[in-house]
Image (tube, rainbow, N blue to C red):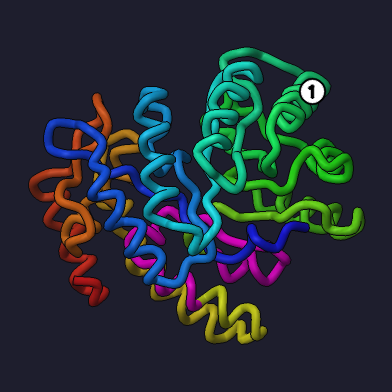
Amino acid sequence: MDTRFTGLIPPVVTPFTQDGSVDLAGLDRVIEHLIAGGVNGLFLLGSSGETAYLTDAERDAIIERAITTTAGRVPVLTGAIDTTANRVIEQARRAQALGVDAVVATCPFYAINDAVEIADHFRAIAAAIDVPLFAYDVPVRLNGVKLGCDLLVQLGREGVLAGVKDSSGDDVAFRRLVAANEAAGHPLALLTGHECVVDGMLLLGSDGVVPGYANVDPRSYADIWQVAQRGDWEEARRIQDRICAGFEIVYVPQGRSGDASGIGAFKTAMQAIGIIDTNTMAFPVKALQGDAKDRVVAIVREQGLI
């Protein structure tokens, strides 16, 4: 396992200006906030980064600016999220040329492939780049496709995959993956996308955490990682309970899309704290306003983050 890719690796939010342009100066502030909060790495252009809404030029500009701002202080992973292998390879090669430390890719989507074809998809991407490749397991965004334990471990043993970013929400499957990975000699760095059961995921053997709410409160997640390394599970649970109280912001919006509710709440909190200038979302998603915005800010204030 490549130990560079363990610990707290938050999926970085992409800030926008009021007119919807990518706010690169705001991205600088997000990155400095995260590094000051004790992160072990950064994951660009995932779901929290609203990558599906961005043009290729915007994705490249984000990577280039993040690499410059990070200046080697922590590893930078980036999503190369696209429908099929050849399209992913184009993005992954550009990201590699810009200096990323690892690429994160999903299985094909819109295209309908079986397990053998999905394995070849990852093999082709890995063969085309010279940086480690992570599989992004996020069935809710991939036609409901869940990457199988046997497939992931086999690709790890082949050296195709360096790790897995698990956002499936399937904790039984993740536990099975941890056990199978261990039995195979631990070829994969296994990262959980959970927000509110990080203590449990670390207890069962996760190598790291990729929580979107860390954009708001990175220090608490850094603390839970550190106490988990010491085996202080009582303190880990106490920190997790505090995180969960703040994470209530995502339940404030009602009747909105998942992106508007989750990422929109993160951005609203970050604006209130002063990390970013606006809570603008990528078009056509509308930012939280009015009562929903006020209630999110109230929770952030109650948590002492403002």
Q: How many marks?
A: 1
Q: Overall secondary structure of the magenta stretch? A: helix
The image quadrant where one finds the N terminus is bottom right
Estimate the x, y position of residue 24 in percent, counting from the top left. 27, 43
Q: In what quadrant of the picture does the C terminus appear?
A: bottom left
Would residue 203 be counted in the magenta stretch? yes
Residue 72 lies, in percent from the top left, at 50, 59
Q: Report whether residue 251 is seen.
A: no
As helix, strand or loop, the secondary structure at mark 1 comes to: helix
- Above-or-below relation of 11 to 128: below
Which class describes the residues within 10 Å of circle 1: few (<14), some (14-19), or many (20+)?
some
Q: Residue at x 64, y 68 (%)?
A: 202
Asked if the stretch drawn in magenta spans residue 253, the answer is: no
On the rendered structure, is 87 left or right of 257?
right
- At label 1, the amino acid type is Asp
Residue under label 1: 120
Q: Is residue 264 above or below residue 224?
A: above
Q: Which residue appears at 47% of the width and 56% of the height?
A: 10
Q: Which span is picked out in magenta?
A: 198-223
**Percent from the top left, x then y, of residue 272?**
16, 60
Of all residues, the one furthest to the top in this rendering is 111
User: Which residue corresponds to the image point at 58% horizontal and 37% vertical from the top-left?
Assistant: 96
To which quarter of the image does residue 21 belong?
Answer: top left
- The residue depicted at 37 percent of the width and 54 percent of the height is 69
